[in-house]
Image (cartoon, rainbow, N blue to C red):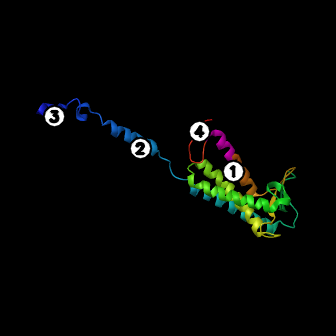
Amino acid sequence: MTEAERIIGTPDSPEGTGAEPEQSSRTDGQESAGARPRGKRRIAVLFGVAAFAYALDLISKMIVVAKLEHHEPIEIIGDWLKFEAIRNAGAAFGFGEAFTVIFTVIAAAVIVVIARLARKLYSLPWAIALGLLLGGALGNLTDRIFRSPGVFEGAVVDFIAPKHFAVFNLADSAIVCGGILIVLLSFKGLDPDGTVHKD
């Protein structure tokens, strides 16, 4: 090969065309498609929100049992909103009092499902929603395990009493807010792993 051929390159040489080998280009494309960045997992957010919701619920129930139970209701906004301590053996908002053990099992199952789902959680809104569900479920499950009349049959402490509505607690509120957020995220097509799909 002459000096001119070496500098200019032959037609068959990658040096002459300025292009990378075709096989190398295919490999790079396959690697970039398969190694799409996922971002950071949101497990810490999920458990942080759950711990905050659980702590608020637990503290509020301790105060209600100590200061409000067996006392007259406290009016917050006239007759429209009161704090009134009751014991609820049913589900959220007082439904199904004859199935306390079943609701306890359901709450435990929800906690297990959320813990398993956390492994593929990359969406911040989903982390907040699942954290609210987890904190609320743990709050009411704690009552069912440790309060009278017995283990897995304990009555939940409710105290928020709006007019013409069922009495509930902060755990119920967290569960409802988390459920509404999940419905909205699903409607928008956002999955827990952070991907967005359009039906």
Q: Is residue 74 visible?
A: no
Cα distance in 3D space between marks 2 and 1: 37 Å
Kindly identify the amino acid type of the residue bearing the numbered disc 4.
His
Residue 169 percent coordinates (x, y): 77, 58
Residue depicted at x 71% and y 58%: 137
Q: Amino acid at mark 1?
A: Gly
Q: Residues within 10 Å of mark 3 (few under 14, many from 20)?
A: few
Residue located 33% across and 36% down the image: 22
Which residue is under mark 2?
31
Sooner in the amino-acid sequence: mark 4 or mark 3:
3
The residue stretch that appears in magenta: 181-189
Q: Residue at x 73, y 51 (%)?
A: 176
First along the sequence among labels 4 and 1: 1
Label 1, secondary structure: give it.
helix
Other residues around mark 4 within 10 Å, as few (<14) / some (14–19) / many (≥20):
few
Instruction: From this view, report whether residue 18 is shown above or below residue 91.
Output: above
C-alpha span from label 1 to label 3: 69 Å
Q: Specify the label residue 197 is tagged with.
A: 4
* Helix, strand or loop at mark 3: helix
Asked whether disc 1 touches disc 3, contact meaning CB atoms under 8 Å apart, the reply is: no
